Amino acid sequence: MCFNNVVTDTQNPTSAHTAEPHRGSLGSRLNWLRAGVLGANDGIVSVAGIVVGVAGATTDHLAVLMAGIAGLVAGALSMAGGEYVSVSTQRDTERALLHKEKEELKTMPEAEERELAGIYEDKGLSAELAAQVARELTAKDALQAHAEAELGLDPDDLTSPWQAAWASLLSFSIGGLLPLLAITLPPLSWRVWTCVLAVAAGLFLTGYVSARLGDARARRAVLRNVGVGLLTMLVTYYVGALFGVAVH
């Protein structure tokens, strides 16, 4: 059996796979999408809690608007900054691991090739085939082969702190705009209930999408998501009402 001939196509050996997404890239895209949905969810809940709380304290339209804008900007920047720091730390760790692997490939190439063969043996290949696979992958791109097999990393596709920061900033802002607009655009007597309904709808959507992306039960995720959002608004509204001020 030859490793190069495990997958064949009588017309074009590569055509069958050129349109197929690789599992790594597909998983990465799903993770980014899930992170975006969760960022929007945080924006909805955080800003809704602020504006409903202020609405419980005062009927001043400008005060509610300013509090909502401040909460949206502060929350978005906080999310972006936190994501940047977190992903930067992750990227530094990935680079350190790749550097260590590169040094080991330089100083002990035979031992590293045996280690790679052992990994494929553990996955079920015969010793002969595992050795052949390790030899051919090492000849093609040793660092790539070892990074993927040992570390689960793609040296050419490391996480990007700036991309993560901008994604968090954008998703939180989009989510936060929903309760902000819902409580500032309607008439005074409708604003709180309009905000509650808009937030419930938004959380229903983010809960459903996040559940589908994670292959979880949508009903449970939606109920949990909407329940937490409604509880947040209920608590913050009455906290605001306790410290309410009369506006003349």
Image: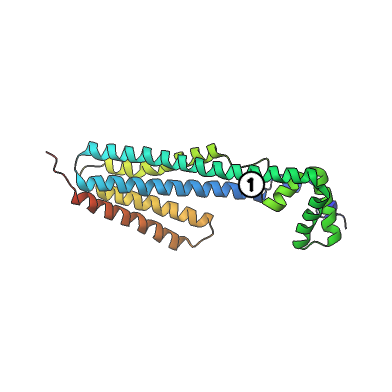
Q: Position of residue 206 (x, y in %)?
A: 44, 51
- Classify mark 1: residues with Cα within 10 Å, few (<14), some (14-19) or many (20+): few
Q: Is residue 225 visible?
A: yes
Q: Is residue 154 visible?
A: no
Which residue does the image show at 46% across and 55% down from the upper left? Answer: 208
Specify whether 37 is left or right of 25.
left
Residue under label 1, please give it.
25
Q: Position of residue 72 (x, y in %)?
A: 36, 40
At mark 1, the secondary structure is helix
Numbered label tally: 1
Q: Residue furthest front?
A: 107
Which residue does the image show at 37% across and 52% down from the upper left? Answer: 201
Question: How does the figure colour the protein chain or chains?
Answer: rainbow
* Residue 185 sits in quarter: top left
Specify whether 194 is left or right of 117.
left
Residue type, label 1:
Ser
Tell me the quadrant of the picture where the N terminus can be found: bottom right
Which residue does the image show at 35% across and 50% down from the upper left? Answer: 199
Q: Nearer the viewer, residue 102 or 6?
A: 102
Which residue does the image show at 39% across and 45% down from the upper left? Answer: 43
Tell me the quadrant of the picture where the C terminus can be found: top left
Q: Position of residue 148 (x, y in %)?
A: 70, 49
Q: Position of residue 180 (x, y in %)?
A: 32, 42
